[in-house]
Image: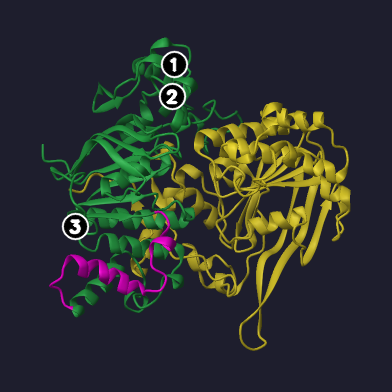
Amino acid sequence: MSGGELLRLEGLEKHFILSRGLGWSRRRLRAVDNVSFAIPAGQTLGLVGESGCGKSTLGRVLVGLIAPTGGRILLDGQPVSPARSQTERRHIQMVFQDPYASLDPRMTIHEVVAEPLRINGGYTPERVDALLAQVGIAAEAGRRLPAQFSGGQRQRIAIARALALDPRILILDEAVSALDVSIQAQIVNLLRELQRRIGLTYLFISHDLSVVRHISQQVAVMYLGRIVEIGPCAQALDSPAHPYTQALLSAAPDPRRRGRRRIVLAGDLPNPLDPPSGCVFRTRCFKATERCAREVPALAPLPDGRQVACHYAEAVDRTRLAELLVPLTRASQDAGIPITKETHKEDPK
Amino acid sequence: MSVPVLETRDLAVEFAGPEGPVRVVDKVSFTLDPGEVLGLVGESGSGKSVTLLAVMGLLPPTARIVSGEVRFLGQRIDTADETALQRLRGGDMAMIFQDPMTSLNPVLRIGTQIAEAIALHRPGLGRRAIAARVVELLGMVGVPDPEARSRQFPHEFSGGMRQRAMIAMAIANEPKLLIADEPTTALDVTIQAQVMEVLEEVRARTGSSMVLVTHDLGLVAETAQRIAVMYAGRIAELAPTEAIFERPAHPYTIGLLASLPSLDATGEMLASIPGQPPDMRQRPPGCAFHPRCHLGRDRTRCAGERPVLAALGDGRLAACHYAREAEAGAATAIPSGVGVAG
């Protein structure tokens, strides 16, 4: 099923030009900056990063909701034209985060799923029933309104709608993030089952590394519009090499790994309108040196093949991230910044 | 044993609905010892937030406590009048809400808002002393340059900084009880880690007890000494943190843990709990979880008789007729790697 690559991005960028209130000065916000990757047919690439890193903008550019300001998108080796043809649109569909906002409250769910078919031709009631059945919703439920469904069921309906035009790629933008754990597991399983059955290709945008690990073969980590690490999950998530990936993995609470020490990054995300010189991550990085302020690190391959944008990239096994803290503790004490802590302390009093 | 900081006994809360009252919290009992952190976990609509609003006397007008009692340091507070509660709230009992953007006043400076919290409870304190205390508090929660930042407005603070300001406000009067309702849910993981660290640090310093309400099992695992798991308005299981993760005894807890995606277990399908949480207007009879339960689905006892929260030993409590059987089966249901520190 997994054949050649289906989707390729080459140097994709989306810059927003913001004019300020006074004067003529204009500022450039690099929401997506020189992003390149490829997804093989039938596989999943997980795109992770925190709010404001540009992951959703990237998803919107791919689905054609906003136009890129540079770079190319190739579908099956063919460049996608900026003004997309109907087939190009059909091939890439999207599922959004909030199932309460993405379904028209006044349309029956049958109509919700039928709408793309009516617009593109090919509507039959049976087709809609089959689409609903595919996501585990009974055809009789089609007469009801979205308000009568729970969050998890609404997300199933949104998936049925996205599948209506037989897309080859689904962009899943935080598609399970708003759901409770037990329901989230149901939807993740549904997505995996659909992928196996129809051979769909996914771009799975999420901030949750554990969910990404479950559903993806590859993962890309974004920070301030750029990819800082990309590679197979078994490399990038099991032995992360970029300090940001290391910090993300270390900070994520996980009941299965209680009592470990974790890396806590200092400070906030920098203002994207005024990014730091050199490496954009250096202001929060525990490895940063002078060199990081001068030179922008290029996304370069490590011996194992995964790519990392860091001058001091070094793969560290996920279970041994705490060992990074030993030299750190001293450095951070000098700077007066609390970086480490023993979690799950004994009761103090 | 000392007097618990907080104790609820058979607490029940009902909301007025068009078809009669809806019970959203049903006979919830727990205690919180001095210096202890109790995690209150559950999915949306499980009643965890309403339980705490009832404790704080902050229920909306459409809801009321229909039975049970709440004691703070041994004193009944569910029957206390509003004046007494106002003296308590922000003083000995403080709350940290989920969304610092909506719980801070956007037109008042951060420092002014914290000062207000202090002045309300310590009327004798002079302006200078209050201002100094505000700067001290902001410094304590890791706000850089606290003097200048105390003169800024909430919109000039990032999400993480706002939550720090909220924590500063909550600890202003050295409360004996902190109630944190999803304090980091709106924040990114790296910021969440910072805020939890600050919260734990100031809590340890002031010696407060804390109830941490969250849907995130990972978060409570690292902070709480005991965890109460809620389902459909009731406590399904209450046990020390280690026991919840290593020897869960309620099928719902077992299902929740199994459906958590992990960085370690990959490739296979996630275990999931079939069905949806019940509509509170039509709570299933007997055990509210039985229609979704792999043990109780076909057993008449589960459909007919409501299980009480019963002791299993070692401080573990579970509301399940077949807790022993569930516990024995759990070993195979949850992916390996549980409880191993990395």
Rendered position, A8 above or below B135:
above
Image location (x, y in percent) of residue A25:
66, 85
Quarter holding the C terminus of chain B is top left
Quarter holding the N terminus of chain B is top left
Gap between marks 3 and 1, in whole Å?
47 Å
Q: Residues within 10 Å of mark 2 (few under 14, many from 20)?
A: many
Q: Residues within 10 Å of mark 3 (few under 14, many from 20)?
A: few
**Helix, strand or loop at disc 2?**
loop
Image location (x, y in percent) of residue B201:
28, 56
Q: Amino acid at mark 2?
A: Phe
Q: Is residue B118 magenta?
A: yes
Q: Residues within 10 Å of mark 1 (few under 14, many from 20)?
A: some
The residue under label 3 is B83
The residue under the point 46% across, 66% down is B158
Q: Amino acid at mark 3?
A: Thr
Subunit of label 1: B
**Helix, strand or loop at disc 1?**
loop
Magenta-colored span: B98-126
The residue under label 1 is B296
Rendered position, A47 above or below B20:
below
Single out the mark in the foreground, 3 or 2.
Answer: 3
Which of pointers 2 and 1 lies earlier in the amino acid sequence?
A: 2
The residue under label 2 is B289
Foreground pick, A338 / A195: A195
Q: Which mark is residue B166?
A: none
Q: Is residue A251 visible?
A: yes
Q: Which chain is green?
A: B
Disc 3 and disc 2 on one polypeptide chain: yes
Q: Amino acid at mark 1?
A: Gly
Gap between marks 2 and 1, in whole Å?
8 Å
Q: Colour of chain A?
A: yellow
Single out the mark in the foreground, 3 or 1.
Answer: 3
